[in-house]
Image (spheres, rainbow, N blue to C red):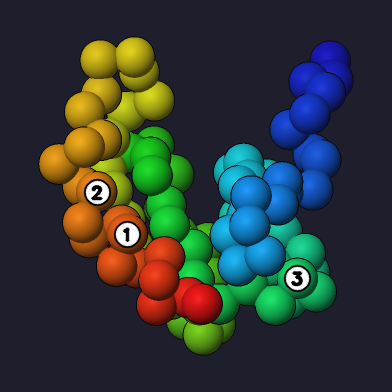
Amino acid sequence: MHIYGQMDEASVIFDHLLLGTTFNASNKAELERREVSHILNVTREVDNFFPADGFSYKNIRVFDEEESQLLPYWEETHRFINEAR
């Protein structure tokens, strides 16, 4: 069984901001090729893949559900994204 889209490259939101999946976060070659330095991990189910390899992580532990509240994390995630610029 193939689930299409999960193995695509991360999408470019801005020059300094990509949006990706668990697959992208686990693909060290893609992270290095795209010169990713910071990874915002917004999931309760997936741990950081390369914490000892020089990537800076910020974890927001929420479930991927419609009821999940993300607004309380806005300031800290905004700060983290700006650090990556």
The residue lying at 75 percent from left, 71 percent from top is 34
Foreground tag (1 vs 3): 1
Nearer to us in this view, 15 or 50: 15
Q: Residue 85: percent from the left, percent from the top? A: 51, 77
Looking at the image, tell me whether mark 2 or mark 3 is earlier in sequence order.
3
In the picture, measured across the screen, residue 50 lies left or right of residue 24, that is: left
Circles 2 and 3, Cβ within 8 Å, touching? The answer is: no
The residue lying at 32 percent from left, 59 percent from top is 78
- Residue under numbered circle 1: 78
Dividing the picture into quarters, in which one does residue 75 lie? Answer: bottom left
Q: Amino acid at mark 2?
A: Trp
> Badge 1, how many Cα within 10 Å: few under 14, some, many 20+?
few
- What secondary structure is found at the residue carrying circle 1? helix
Gap in Å between the C-alphas at discs 2 and 3?
25 Å
Q: Residue 56: percent from the left, percent from the top? A: 43, 76
Q: Amino acid at mark 3?
A: Arg
From where the camera sits, is residue 84 visible?
A: yes
The residue lying at 79 percent from left, 48 percent from top is 9
Q: Amino acid at mark 1?
A: His
In this view, 5 is above or below 22 = above
Which label belongs to residue 34?
3
Gap in Å between the C-alphas at discs 1 and 3?
21 Å
- Residue under numbered circle 2: 74
In the picture, measured across the screen, residue 23 lies left or right of residue 70, that is: right
In this view, 1 is above or below 72 = above
- What secondary structure is found at the residue carrying circle 2? helix
Circles 2 and 1, Cβ within 8 Å, touching? The answer is: yes
Which label belongs to residue 60?
none
Q: Residue 8: percent from the left, percent from the top? A: 81, 40
